[in-house]
Amino acid sequence: MQSCDIRVESEASTSQQLLPKAMAANSNELEDSATQDATPTNSSETEDSETQDATSTNGNDLDSEWQDATSTNGSDHKDSETQDVVTDDVTPWTAEQIMETMPQAETYYVETCTVAILADYDGCWDVISETNPMANEKAFQKCGANYTFVKGILESGITSITRDKKVTLFVGSNRQSSRVDKFNNERNQNGLALGNTGAFERWANKYKTQGWSLNKALLSDGDMCFSSWGNDSAFSLGFNGKDKDLKVRIAANSFKHLNCTEKTDVFFFDDKADFLEHVRQNAKIPQHINFYTMHYDWYSYALKGNSEPLIAKGVDGKQRQL
């Protein structure tokens, strides 16, 4: 099933209603900037710097992005990441002819008994989050989208890589501290990801009988492993670099806490294709890990006409359809 986020607003001047403000502007923009330059000094100074940095990079940009999206009905939103969809109205060819002319991804076969997932939240897995008040059919219908379809794309991909496997779930989101988690929720209105009642705990509990477990490692832990989970006073990570580099650090931290030496498939989900490419090119992958990235931007399926199944892309550049 598919999901929307935040307040649902209608645009009378367009033929199709857009998703709520923060999510229609693609909330992943907010997620990434919210964690920049948060230097761990003391708790009050850290919190202030986080909010000031995120506000300075998001406040005005959010309004302009939303105005651009409503004026164009989202037609310019992330075109480079959305594939064209072939329909019967476009060509009289048969389905078989279409399939013959389209580039085909390799069939993907999971090689190991264990799987690790690094899941991004804003703009990605928040579409299936129980803490997200807009992750439901009613909210999506108000903006002309099919929640069941959008959500189903992600859930089908997850099922295909986890069936009959032992699964370890990691936080692949930039929400690497409780403070950033709360800040992004306040800005995006798409629910909390961390903590005992957050989305990641709920996913792990929901699929516990299917072999899922949650690894609570966060970059804000510092030298005290798992100390940041549900801890509002924990320092945020001090990070002065590009957001895509932060994703590389998240991957490295997850590899370190995977606690296995046997061959393991690791999948990194994110809604930004360029971030994932940067991780594939720059992350140091241990020899016992088969590393793949999974690009999923629910907005493209909700309002951009994307209908392609998810693709697992390896560090060798090969694509494998799930």
Image (spheres, rainbow, N blue to C red):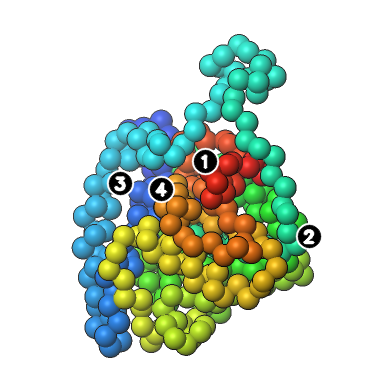
- Counting residues from the N terminus, which is met first, the one under dot 2 or under dot 1? 2
Q: Earlier in the sequence, mark 4 or mark 3?
A: 3
Going by the numbered disc 4, the residue's amino acid type is Asp
Residue placed under numbered mark 3 in the picture: 66
Is the residue 233 above or below the residue 130 in the image?
below
Sequence-earlier tag: 2 or 4: 2
Where disc 2 sits, the SS reads loop
In-front residue for pair 115/212:
115
Q: Which numbered disc covers residue 274?
A: 4
Q: Is residue 312 left or right of residue 54?
A: right
- For image coordinates 63% across by 76% down, the residue present is 259
Q: Which secondary structure lies at badge 1?
A: helix
Residue on which disc 2 sits: 164
In the image, residue 158 sits, relative to residue 113, either above or below, namely above
Give the CA separation, mark 1 to mark 4.
18 Å
Which comes sooner in the sequence, label 1 or label 4? 4
Above or below, 44 against 150 in this view is: below
Q: In x, y percent, where is residue 48?
A: 24, 78
**Which amino acid, by three-letter code, is at mark 1?**
Tyr
The mark found on residue 301 in the picture is 1
